[in-house]
Image (cartoon, grey):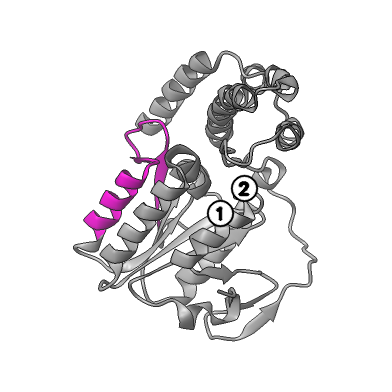
Amino acid sequence: MPPTLIGDVMDSLSDGHLYSAIFDTPHDVYSWIELISNTYRMPVTFLSRIPESRLSKDLDLSVIQSVWISNKSNKEGILLNHESIYKFIESRSTENSGVFVIEGLEWLISESGMRNTLRHIMNLSDYIFDKPIVVIYVVQTNTIDEEVMEKISRQAPLLDVGLDAVPDQNGNTSTDTGESESVPTQEEEYPLIPYLTTLPLEGFSHKILRKRILQWRRLGFDVSDCEPGIFCDDIGESHSIYLSVDKKVREATELLNIMDSVRDNISKSEFTVMEFRLRQLTGMNEVSSKLRAIIDDVSDS
């Protein structure tokens, strides 16, 4: 199915339907959410990978509800898994209509698998079918393989969310010239680290592993423990080595993004030490405990 153009999105979002959308940066997501909030008739709820304390710098949370979803239990939000997301939407749909924008699809695919993810998407689609609800999965560019995204889009049609021409509240269209007089914000200087989907054993090869190692290195991770997998004759053993490192990278990515969201509450020296350890894929339990304590302090203050 061809993407629906952004200028037509407000007319084409139909109650009881799922959609998907791909963005280059988190800030493109925020801009688009504000666009929907300003022009669509329903309230918008954003299930975000970062806590509300950080989102308040990018979104007007007086009109957009934010819910933090994380793979670690927290008292402010919900767990990042299909069941928790389904139950959350179910609990809200009994009283209200609305648009639910969901981050973290790449993590859900990696944790649950493609087949299981599609099953949950279809279950959610069946549930909202006759309800005044719209669900949109938002994905960052290059975090989900094209073939996988094609399967997703069959259940959740892909929206073309290019921000070069968007309608304002009166339905007029403005064009982004690519020039901006604004000063880059701190969040633009420190973008969230993307999650890369876990590579399945089927189709896995040494060439693919080399490419993934290069991607990890470009993100700043020390993945030297994965290099022996390049030289394993047994592709199954090579994949097992990859999986062990992938698990560490995913946990480190989660912690780095959480750490960035509370950077104002961490001293510069401690932040540097914690970041170094995570990029070396070491000391993650200790860093996780420190971050949990910091988040609890911020929540209580």
Which residue is painted at 62% across and 19% down in the image?
281
Instruction: Looking at the image, tell me whether mark 1 or mark 2 is earlier in sequence order.
Output: 2
Q: Position of residue 131 (x, y in %)?
A: 26, 71
The verdict on residue 74 being magenta is yes
In the rendered view, tell whether residue 271 sits above or below residue 130. Answer: above
Q: Residues within 10 Å of mark 2 (few under 14, many from 20)?
A: some
Amino acid found under the numbered disc labelled 1: Val
The verdict on residue 229 being magenta is no
Q: Is 165 left or right of 105, judged from the image as shown?
A: right
Q: Which residues are magenta?
A: 65-92
Residue picked out by circle 1? 148
Which residue is painted at 31% across and 58% down in the image?
123
Q: Position of residue 160 (x, y in %)?
A: 60, 71
Q: Position of residue 33 (x, y in %)?
A: 51, 63
Point out the frontmost of discs 1 and 2: 1
Which residue is painted at 19% across and 62% down in the image?
94
Which residue is painted at 62% across and 26% down in the image?
242
In the rendered view, tell whether residue 115 sits above or below residue 275. Answer: below
Which residue is more in the foreground, 300 or 272?
Answer: 272
Q: Is 50 left or right of 164, judged from the image as shown?
A: left
Hey, which quadrant is residue 280 in on the image? top right
- Asked whether the viewer can see residue 235, the reply is yes
Q: Which mark is residue 132?
A: none
Q: Position of residue 49 (x, y in %)?
A: 48, 43
Amino acid found under the numbered disc labelled 2: Thr
Q: Which mark is residue 143?
A: 2
